[in-house]
Amino acid sequence: MHVCQGTACHLKGAGRLTEGLSRRLGIEPGNATPDLQFSLEKVKCLGNCDKAPVMMVDRDFYNRAGVDRLTKILKPYRKAKEE
């Protein structure tokens, strides 16, 4: 997954979002989970600055993403991998 670190996203909490994902997945940015299900990357801009903070999982964009939404965002991807 990619977390935008551009100016708008930074100001709207991209750092907290990245930290939340890092804690939840047990990995630091630039790494993958041991089962290779998830990787976490910081990126410069995902192009949805007016909807910051923005993250992308596979090819799906999540606008106004926050730590409080991570369980809901990650759930379908965890399921898809288990099937």
Image (cartoon, rainbow, N blue to C red):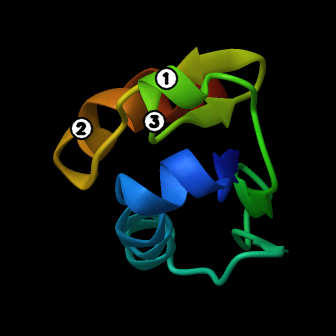
Q: Which mark is residue 50?
A: 1
Residue type, label 3: Ala
Circle 3: element type: loop
Residue 75 relative to residue 34: left or right = left
Q: Are marks 2 and 3 in contact (CB under 8 Å)?
A: no
Circle 2: element type: helix
Q: Residues within 10 Å of mark 2 (few under 14, many from 20)?
A: few
Residue 68 % position (x, y): 16, 47
Q: CA distance from mark 2 to mark 3?
A: 14 Å
- Which quadrant, please, contains the N terminus? top right
Front label number (1 vs 3): 1
Q: Are marks 1 and 2 in contact (CB under 8 Å)?
A: no
What residue would you read off at disc 3? Answer: 52
Front label number (1 vs 2): 1
Residue type, label 2: Arg
What residue would you read off at disc 2? Answer: 69
Q: Which numbered disc flags the more N-terminal residue, 2 or 3? A: 3
User: Which residue lies at the image location 45% right of the left edge and 42% below the top edge?
Assistant: 53
As drawn, 53 above or below 6: above
Residue type, label 1: Asp
Q: CA distance from mark 1 to mark 3?
A: 6 Å
As drawn, 57 above or below 33: above
User: Which residue lies at the image location 71% right of the left edge and 49% below the top edge?
Assistant: 37
Front label number (2 vs 3): 3
As drawn, 53 above or below 81: below
Q: CA distance from mark 1 to mark 2?
A: 18 Å
- Which quadrant, please, contains the C terminus? top right
Residue 39 relative to residue 57: left or right = right
Q: Residues within 10 Å of mark 1 (few under 14, many from 20)?
A: few
- Say which of 34 and 11 sits in front: 11
Pick out the residue farthest to the left. 68
User: Which residue lies at the image location 45% right of the left edge and 23% below the top edge?
Assistant: 51
